[in-house]
Image (cartoon, grey):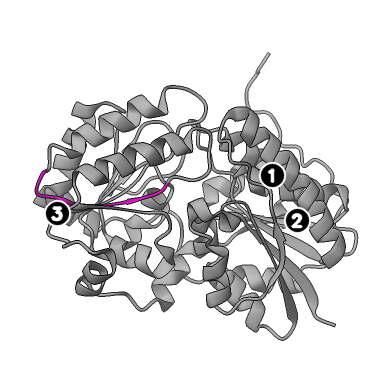
Amino acid sequence: MPRKIAVMTGSRAEYGLLYWLIRGIADDPDLELKLLVAGMHLSPEFGNTWMEIQRDGFEIAAKVEMLLSSDSPVGIAKSTGLGVIGFADALELIKPDILVILGDRFEALAAAVAAHILRIPVAHIHGGECTYGAMDDAFRHSITKLSQLHFVAAESYRQRVIQMGEHPNRVFLTGSPGLDHLEHISYLSAQELESDLGIGLSHPVFLVTYHPVTLHGSPETAFASLLRALDGFPEASIVFTYPNADTHGRVIVRMLEDYVSRHPERARAVASLGQRRYLSLLKHCDVVIGNSSSGITEAPSFGVPTVNIGDRQRGRLRAASVIDCEEDEGAIRGAIQRALSPEFRNSALRADNPYGKLGASRRIIKILKEFPLEGILEKGFFDLPLTADYR
């Protein structure tokens, strides 16, 4: 009897990272895929991306409506609660052998809580990482403690998960499954992208994604600084992608849409590019700008410089192609100028990606198929000796 694997996705970015894992599970005769779709995927405001999932040929086992229209802290907390309720119903109906969750968002936390209470094992991807500027940091570590299997992207992250008390024989260094697109994807040409987006992509091309920093500071002030910095490059073509459904995300959407309306000849905003268009833009652009994890984990594999703004990704491993800068106009403008310099562009082409090599999805599927699940819910705390006096 095939092992029943549930995979949860709550956002376009997460689905992109999971795509080849989902495809591999669906195509494996020893596994039965049960896809849970939630959060932003079901929102017209964020592009109704559940339809893209269906167009990709995947059957959706359950849709979990959980996203309130409010993006205030109270609204996000309530959405998380609705998610626990919705995932409890879906998981009880599906009864999977194991649930696969990627990352650190509140949708993922809701799914992990429901699975834990229902005594369904959880396999977590991308644990052990740190993003000090976002509340997602605590969500990620919480999911680690709610999980039984761990698939991490780098050795230092493996060590951190073990440091959190997880047994080494359940923590696997697989790399990032999002990089598997490089092995399979057929890229759109620059001309096809221009036709699709309705603007010319004259160089330099900027791919911009900015998410609100959820623990401190003013997202509006920081994003306004970014927009003013972009004004310093009037020759650039700019493609904005929407932020995630985080606290104050809708403020960012209004600001970027206003910017595009004032620069229609050279700027576009897209709620969801989809994986093929996004990666094609990543291939053809000159700089990735903002604070998305994609600039940290995926852009280095394309040899594209990243201008990473502020603290949202602080704590993650970085390739030499990433330039960190503060959230002020002058620092952002200076970082973009450096990223566009021939010297830095050449160095970015040679940068190694610390998030592993291709084939992570295959490695994860092999473990999902073979790891014994009997008694997996019971786990102790793996103690490490202290190397310093912390009193």
Question: Where, by quadrant of the figure, is residue 278 drawn?
Answer: bottom left
Of badges 2 and 1, the one in the foreground is: 1
Query: What's the residue type where badge 3 is placed?
Result: Pro
Q: Which quadrant is the C terminus positioned in?
A: top right
Residue drawn at (81%, 66%), measured in percent from left and top?
A: 96
| Residue closest to the eye, 178 or 83 | 83
Please report whichever mark, 3 or 2, sits nearer to the chain's N-terminal start: 2
Badge 1 local density, few (<14 within 10 Å), some, or many (20+)? many
Decide if residue 354 is in sight here. Answer: yes
How far apart marks 3 and 2 lie (CA) works out to: 43 Å
Please tell me whether mark 1 sits on a helix, a strand or a loop. helix
Q: Name the residue under label 1.
A: 109
How far apart marks 2 and 1 lie (CA) works out to: 11 Å
Please report whichever mark, 2 or 1, sits nearer to the chain's N-terminal start: 1
Q: Along the horizontal axis of the image, is 23 left or right of 369?
A: left
Magenta-colored span: 234-242
Q: Which quadrant is the N terminus positioned in?
A: bottom right
Please tell me whether mark 3 sits on a helix, a strand or a loop. loop
Q: Where is residue 216 in the image (x, y as percent from the top left)?
A: 48, 23
Q: Which mark is residue 229?
A: none
Query: What's the residue type where badge 1 is placed?
Result: Leu
Q: Name the residue under label 2.
A: 122
Badge 3 local density, few (<14 within 10 Å), some, or many (20+)? some
Q: Position of residue 233 (x, y in %)?
A: 12, 42
Q: Position of residue 292 (x, y in %)?
A: 41, 46
Decide if residue 373 is in sight here. Answer: no
Q: Mark 3 points at which residue?
A: 204
Q: Along the horizontal axis of the image, is 55 left or right of 198?
A: right
| Residue closest to the eye, 347 or 37 | 37
Q: Along the horizontal axis of the image, is 187 left or right of 329?
A: right
